[in-house]
């Protein structure tokens, strides 16, 4: 079974530029998550989708971050404009649970390491 | 807001020694999950505990969920160099949606 795919793996941009990350979850997984992981900390949820609907985006800085999951499969996360404090690893995860609750095992992708200079 | 705290933040042991990390939530949890993240890697699911007082074992790893469902622990017996990494506990947020992760305990093992 293929795992969660993410691209790119690394990205370096200057502040105020824009960047987009892509995620393809495990086939059949209804729930998709985007996390931000700053060095030395645990993953912090940015947004959770169930199929193509948003379940939780309370911690997404909506003035600069946006995400979509068209057709309930792939997802993209965009930052525009980027700030220095956005430097982090952006992890995508998916889970089987179809009720949008945090009760199921989550499978993480390899992440995208973003450096903002 | 709801918090999940872990101690210690770092632990260094000699190979063969035991290791324990503790997790505490500010609220009662419906379940708790544990993940391991190797250096440079991504979190990998280890286990989920659901019942009050539950104890589960995976080879040298023992996981416990407290009676009040607010704390948990992970104990590794006779550590090996392959145990190196950061261990995270995570519990559902109060809204019952996605997981809130602790800051993790980073384990280093010297042979």
Image (cartoon, grey):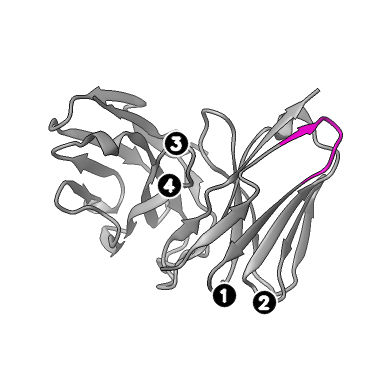
Q: Earlier in the sequence, mark 1 or mark 2?
A: 1
Tag in front: 1 or 4? 1
Q: Which residue is mark 1?
A: B28
Q: Are marks 3 and 2 on the same chain?
A: no
Q: Chain of mark 2?
A: B
Residue under pointer 2: B68
Residue B14: in magenta span:
yes
| Identity of the residue drawn at 68% across and 62% down | B72
CB-based contact (under 8 Å), mark 2 and mark 4: no
User: Which one is earlier in the sequence, the residue at label 3 or at label 4?
Assistant: 3
Q: Are marks 3 and 4 on the same chain?
A: yes
Q: Residues within 10 Å of mark 1 (few under 14, many from 20)?
A: some
The spot of residue A77 in percent (x, y) is: 25, 43
Residue B109 tag number = none
User: Residue beneath label 4, please?
Assistant: A93
Mark 1 and mark 3: span between their CA atoms? Answer: 28 Å
Disc 2 secondary structure class: loop
A13 relative position to B31: left or right = left
Q: Nearer the viewer, residue A63 or A100?
A: A63
Mark 2, Cα crowd under 10 Å, few <14 / some 14-19 / many 20+, is: few
The Cα atoms of the two marked residues, 2 and 4, are separated by: 29 Å
**CA neighbours of label 3 inside 10 A, class few (<14), some (14 to 19), many (20+):** few
Output the chain of dot 1: B
**Residue in the foreground of this view, choosing between B13 and B63:** B13
Res A49 → quadrant: bottom left
Residue in view at x 13 percent, y 30 percent: A17
**Residue A112 on the magenta span:** no
Chain of residue at mark 3: A
Q: Is residue A107 left or right of residue A37?
A: right
Disc 3 target residue: A39
């Amino acid at each position: 079974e293929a795992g969660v795919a993410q691209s790119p793996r690394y990205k370096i941009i200057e502040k105020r530029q824009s960047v987009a990350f892509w995620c393809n979850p495990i086939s059949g997984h209804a729930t998709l998550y985007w996390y931000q992981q700053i060095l030395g900390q645990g993953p912090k949820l940015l947004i959770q989708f169930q199929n193509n609907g948003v379940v939780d985006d309370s911690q997404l800085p909506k003035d600069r971050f946006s995400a979509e999951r068209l057709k309930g499969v792939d997802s993209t996360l965009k930052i525009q404009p980027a700030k220095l404090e956005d430097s982090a690893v952006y992890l995508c995860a998916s889970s089987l649970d179809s009720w949008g609750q945090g009760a199921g095992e989550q499978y993480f992708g390899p992440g995208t390491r973003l450096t903002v200079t | 807001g709801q918090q999940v705290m872990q101690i210690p933040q770092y632990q260094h042991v000699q190979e063969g020694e035991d290791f324990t990390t503790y997790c505490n939530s500010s609220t009662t949890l419906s379940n708790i999950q544990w993940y391991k993240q190797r250096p440079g890697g991504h979190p990998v699911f280890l286990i989920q505990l659901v019942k009050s007082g539950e104890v589960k074992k995976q080879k040298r790893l023992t996981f416990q969920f407290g009676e009040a469902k607010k704390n948990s622990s992970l104990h590794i017996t006779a550590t090996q160099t392959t145990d190196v990494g950061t261990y995270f506990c995570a519990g559902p947020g109060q809204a019952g949606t996605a997981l809130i992760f602790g800051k993790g305990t980073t384990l280093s093992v010297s042979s």
